[in-house]
Amino acid sequence: MEYVIYCDESDSSGQYYGNFYGGLLVRSSDLISTIEALESKKTELNLERELKWQRVTGNYLDKYLEFSELLCDMIANDIVKVRIMFTQNIHTPGRYDDYRRENKYFLLYYQFVKHAFGLQYSPRHESLAKVRVYLDKMPDTREKVESFKDHLESLNKNTSLRRNNILFQKEQIAEIDSKHHVLAQSLDIMLGAMQFRLNDKHLEKPEGQRTRGNRTIAKEKLYKYINKRIRAMHPGFNIGVSTGIKGDIKNRWNHPYRHWLFVPNGAEVDLSKGKRKK
């Protein structure tokens, strides 16, 4: 038994929200059939290029909607789990020391992998359940990437993960090229939709124009469809806050889809950086 997690990040410094991290988890027993189904849908829709949020246009909207329908069905049926983490600009962290400032990207990534899927609250396995982590190519030095992998492997010291027989192995933590992985492309669509709406990109107009561009309108329609599907799983879903646990901490694992608004310890609130003030 393996948990296979695809990870990606986006929009580190958006207008209102930043430091977006996304993850998609699939159990090894479902991995091949899930990939085959999504690849088959791509072929059926003649979507030969890599699927990316940035490639959503009016001409391709219907195809992306149909692909997202299948993806959202898989999420709703807990065949795949999706997690999105982000920070809000109104939360101003305390004074960073040099180490935290220099390694902020990896420190947040570590918190995401450690906590976002609630592996600590997953069912206990009689035999080892290994975790395979696929990271989109990381924009930093090889030394820092290797150090990050070491830190992920050190999660094996976590008491809750050990109790559940969950094991991270450094050799199973790898960088990938998303154009060869349809599950990574699927994650890009979900992550892109959320950062698009949270940073009010649906309101953007081309310079000198009074109306929004066709690409922006198409992206908003795709976001609205995805949001509708999430709301069917989470009535009253609020895109900009952490998803509630509904009285059961195990729902951090059980829920097929969740958001996590990460607030640094000791953060102060600066409302001038919020939407209402602007």
Image (cartoon, grey):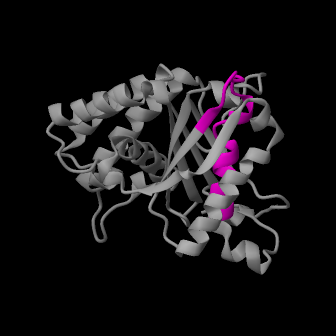
Point 79% across, 47% down: residue: 157
Tell me where residue 115 sits by quadrant: top right
Q: Closer to the camera, 146 or 68? A: 146
Residue at the location (43% across, 25% down)? 30
Q: Quadrant of residue 201?
A: bottom left
Identify the image quadrant of the N terminus: top right
Q: Quadrant of the C terminus?
A: bottom right
Q: Camera-side residue: 121 or 130?
A: 130
Q: Which residues are magenta?
A: 106-130
Instruction: In the rendered view, tell whether residue 4 sits above or below residue 134.
Output: above
The reply, left or right, for residue 150 in relation to residue 207 is right
- Residue 16 versus residue 258 in the image, above or below: below
| Depth order, front residue of 222/142 | 142
Residue most extreme to the bottom: 98
Judged left or right of residue 183, residue 79 is right
| Image spot of residue 136 (x, y percent) | 45, 57
Residue 238 visible in the picture: no
Report x, y in % for residue 276: 63, 55
Percent of width and height locating residue 200: 48, 54
Quick check: is 117 in the magenta stretch? Answer: yes
Judge by depth and name the residue closer to the eye, 265 or 208. Answer: 265
Residue at the image position 33 percent from the left and 39 percent from the top: 221
Can residue 132 be seen here? The reply is yes
Q: From the top left corner, tell me how far across and down residue 57 is, in percent.
A: 23, 49
Above or below: residue 119 compared with residue 201: above
The residue sitting at 35% across, 25% down in the picture is: 33
Q: Quadrant of residue 31?
A: top left
Membership of 112 in magenta stretch: yes
